[in-house]
Each structure stands twice: as structure tokens, then as C-alpha cells.
């Protein structure tokens, strides 16, 4: 699986809060975002079924 880059526009206040949470969890902001995305996908799939990727 290839790793892709994604540009993200985020409010400065929200970014500071993200860094705070990531630091508390002992993660980088990037790792924290990946965990949040993974959790959102898992929650979606619980409600709507597995997302099939071709």
C-alpha cells in the first residue's frame, strides 16, 4: 500500500488543540489524525457495512 500526502486546511485554534491532544497521547499530530480517521472509518463501517475498495 502506498503512502499518500494530503494537504489540510485547519483553523489555528483547532490545530493547537490537536497538538495538545497528540502530545498528551504521546503521538505526533500526524499519528493522531490517522487514528481519528481510522476510528471514523470503523464507526462508519459498523453502521453501513464494510467499504469495498477495488
Image: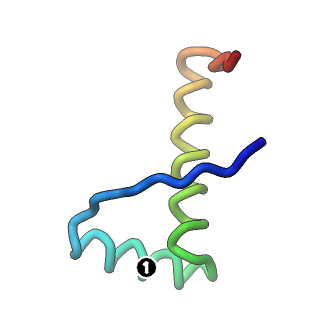
Residue situated furthest right in the rendering: 1
| Rendered residue at 63%/19% (across/down) | 51
Horizontal side, residue 42 vs residue 14: left or right = right
Query: Dividing the picture into quarters, in which one does residue 53 lie?
Result: top right
Q: Position of residue 39 (x, y in %)?
A: 58, 45
- For disc 1, the marked residue is 19
Which residue is nearer to you in this view: 2 or 41? 2
| Rendered residue at 57%/77% (across/down) | 28
Q: Is residue 26 above or below residue 1?
A: below
| Rendered residue at 42%/82% (across/down) | 20
Which residue is nearer to you in this view: 8 or 23? 8
Horizontal side, residue 11 vs residue 35: left or right = left
Q: Position of residue 33 (x, y in %)?
A: 51, 60
Q: Name the element at disc 1.
A: helix
Horizontal side, residue 9 vs residue 27: left or right = left
| Rendered residue at 67%/16% (across/down) | 52
Amino acid at each position: 500500500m502506498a503512502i499518500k500526502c494530503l494537504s489540510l486546511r485547519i483553523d489555528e485554534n483547532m490545530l493547537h488543540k490537536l497538538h495538545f491532544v497528540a502530545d498528551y497521547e504521546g503521538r505526533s499530530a500526524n499519528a493522531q489524525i490517522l487514528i481519528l480517521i481510522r476510528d471514523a472509518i470503523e464507526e462508519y463501517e459498523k453502521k453501513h457495512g464494510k467499504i469495498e475498495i477495488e
